[in-house]
Structures are given as C-alpha cells and as structure tokens.
Amino acid sequence: MSASRFASVVLTLLLVAEAASGGAVAPSDWPRFRGPNGQGVAPDDARPPSQFGTDKNLAWATELPPGHSSPVVAEGRIFLTACHEKKLETICLDAATGNILWRRPAPPIRSKTSTPPTAPPPRRP
C-alpha cells in the first residue's frame, strides 16, 4: 500500500469513528499512536459503523501528501506529519470539516558531529 493510500485509509477510519460518534464537532481525543491508553481500543460506548467506504459513512475527505505518522486528535483538530517536496512537515486539520488549518516544516534533526569515544591504545611494556 502506498504511503498516500495509507494516509487516506487512516483519515477515513478517523472520520468513520467521528461520524459514529454522532457527528460531534469535537471528536474524542486520540492523543497518541493506538489511542488514549496505547492499546488501540475505543471506549466501551463507541459505536463504529459496520460498513464504511468512500460513499458510505464518510464525513469528509482531504487530499494530503504521503506520510507514515499516526494521526493525533485533540480538541477538534487532527495533527499529522507528511512529506511534501522531500521535506517533512506537520499538518493540522479541522476534525469537523477536514480543512487544513496550517502546515509547517518540521524542524531538522540537529546532531553534534563528534567522534565517538574510543579505548586508549594498549600500553607496551
């Protein structure tokens, strides 16, 4: 599955869950990979639909660049990362409408160039 298709599937599943919650403007928070407790289990009162697809139980769809992050849902917004023009960026969407609220380049990884410590040379008698 391509990264773009994966991102579309993940967002579709999030939207289905949001639609199943009654179309509330602010969906339940999903603050990290695999949900609130990291187990990938929705709350007992969640009622996901038994059928979904591009024409059934879909609240909205938004074209996004490919990415591999797990979306985070918080306070009515969806946050994810994607690769656009060979640069990593963070994207924020409105969970109710799918509109992109902002896109920002992710900060580059900064590393100190240093030589790893090595053992001293053995002493000669």
Image (cartoon, grey):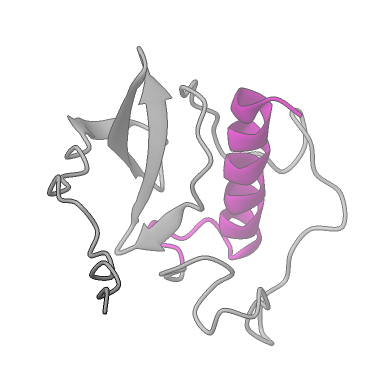
Q: Is residue 45 above or below residue 21?
A: below
The N terminus: image quadrant: top right
In this view, the residue farthest toward the top is 85
Front in this rendered view, residue 100 or 104: 104
Locate residue 124 relative to residue 10 in the image: left or right.
Answer: left
Residue 26: percent from the left, percent from the top? 38, 61
Q: Is residue 15 magenta?
A: yes
Location of residue 39 by image quarter: bottom right
Front in this rendered view, residue 69 or 107: 107
Q: Is residue 121 above or below residue 13?
A: below
Locate residue 73 relative to residue 63 in the image: left or right.
Answer: left
What range of the chain is rendered magenta?
A: 1-27
Q: Main secondary structure of the magenta part?
A: helix
Q: Residue at 67% of width from left, 27% of height from top?
A: 5
Number of callouts in the render? 0
Residue 85: percent from the left, percent from the top? 35, 12
Q: Residue at 40% of width from left, 48% of height from top?
A: 95
Q: Is residue 94 above or below residue 3?
A: below
Residue 106: percent from the left, percent from the top? 22, 38
Q: Residue at 58% of width from left, 62% of height from top?
A: 22
The C terminus: image quadrant: bottom left
Locate residue 98 relative to residue 112 in the image: left or right.
Answer: right
Residue 66: percent from the left, percent from the top? 52, 26
Q: Is residue 6 magenta?
A: yes
